[in-house]
């Protein structure tokens, strides 16, 4: 855990419990992201006998089963985490999703996390713990909100709050930039780190409809420094007006969700390794010149003149 937590865990658990009661109203984003992550897993041709689902909410194991990944990857046991004991469902082994992971070193072949890491106080520390739980050549896959997620809402809320109260209070969580994500994997000790991004564009009738969906997803404000004793009605009315003015089209407003995907492996001797600096046998300039000559030779009937 960090010295100063960003997120209030009790509020996060309460939000997730409420979202579970409202499900399936807010499950569409979790299911969409989970299905995309399951598709990526299907591309990995190897078994994963012991899998850790670190998503903190039920549902991903069902998506894995539906996608065929459990059978295809020979997952004999899935250990799932839950934000609270009441959230545990199905015949899975369940552990708490506190940021101190209760797993032994080198106990799992695969660790997956869906829509959870953007609520972690100490992301580098949790990634290091996940790396520790994986056996050599074990795989870690994650998907979480990052980048420009809800950029429209963030902008309009900030502008509205400046008008209404003369300042800004924390209302939207800080999000990891894609440029930093790969570095976090390397820092945690993963090999062959990969970070990429998907954008999911949605539209809503109003900002109230958007906020209702965020509540049903369990993605509402759980920041420690959020303003508690404040009437939000005036703020959200003004934010809705600004939203419609700046982004509205055909009676609807857009909402952007940027999903960051991470993949990394626990180090193993069999994995590819970068060449030692200075070990190249061909100069880069020579290789580039050869490519240019080859391209010119293949220019065909239009001539073989190289483009300067």
Image (cartoon, helix red, strand yellow):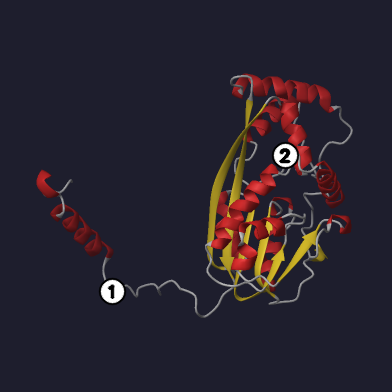
Which residue was labeled with disc 1?
Answer: 281
Mark 1 vs mark 2, CA separation in Å: 51 Å
Q: Residues within 10 Å of mark 2 (few under 14, many from 20)?
A: some
155 left or right, relative to 267: right
Residue 208, label in figure = none
Q: Residue at x 71, y 77 (%)?
A: 105
To which residue does mark 2 refer? 172
Residue 139: image x %, image y %?
A: 60, 68
Look at the numbered disc 1 and give the secondary structure of its residue.
loop
Q: Label 1 neighbourhood size at 10 Å, few (<14), some (14-19), many (20+)?
A: few
For residue 190, above or below residue 306: below
Left or right, 253 with respect to 92, comes to: left
Residue 96: x %, y % from top left: 83, 63
Horizontally, residue 225 falls left or right of residue 36, namely: right
Q: Secondary structure at mark 2?
A: loop
Q: Nearer the viewer, residue 22 or 227?
A: 22
Residue 183 visible in image: no
């Amino acid at each position: 855990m960090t010295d100063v937590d960003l997120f209030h865990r009790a509020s996060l658990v309460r939000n997730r419990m409420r979202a579970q009661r409202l499900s399936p109203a807010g499950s569409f984003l979790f299911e969409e992201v989970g299905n995309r992550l399951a598709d990526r897993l299907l591309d990995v041709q190897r078994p994963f006998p012991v899998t850790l689902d670190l998503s903190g909410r039920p549902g991903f194991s069902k998506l894995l089963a539906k996608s065929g990944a459990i059978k295809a990857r020979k997952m004999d046991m899935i250990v799932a985490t839950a934000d609270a004991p009441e959230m545990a469902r199905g015949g899975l082994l369940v552990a708490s999703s506190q940021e101190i992971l209760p797993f032994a070193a080198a106990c799992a072949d695969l660790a997956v996390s869906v829509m959870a890491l953007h609520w972690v106080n100490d992301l580098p520390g949790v990634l290091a713990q996940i790396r520790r739980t994986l056996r050599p050549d074990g795989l870690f896959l994650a998907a979480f909100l990052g980048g420009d997620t809800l950029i429209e809402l963030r902008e309009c809320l900030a502008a509205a709050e400046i008008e209404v109260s003369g300042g800004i209070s924390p209302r939207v969580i800080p999000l990891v930039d894609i440029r930093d994500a790969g570095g976090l994997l390397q820092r945690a000790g993963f090999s062959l780190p990969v970070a990429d991004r998907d954008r999911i564009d949605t539209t809503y009738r109003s900002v109230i409809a958007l906020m209702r969906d965020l509540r049903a997803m369990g993605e509402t404000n759980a920041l420690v420094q959020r303003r508690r004793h404040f009437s939000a009605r005036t703020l959200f009315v003004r934010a809705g007006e600004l939203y419609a003015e700046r982004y509205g089209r055909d009676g609807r407003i857009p909402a952007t969700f940027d999903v960051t995907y991470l993949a990394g492996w626990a180090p193993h001797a069999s994995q590819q390794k970068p060449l030692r600096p200075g070990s190249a046998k061909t100069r880069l300039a020579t290789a580039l010149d050869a490519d240019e000559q080859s391209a010119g030779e293949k220019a065909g009937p239009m001539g073989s003149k190289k483009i300067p």
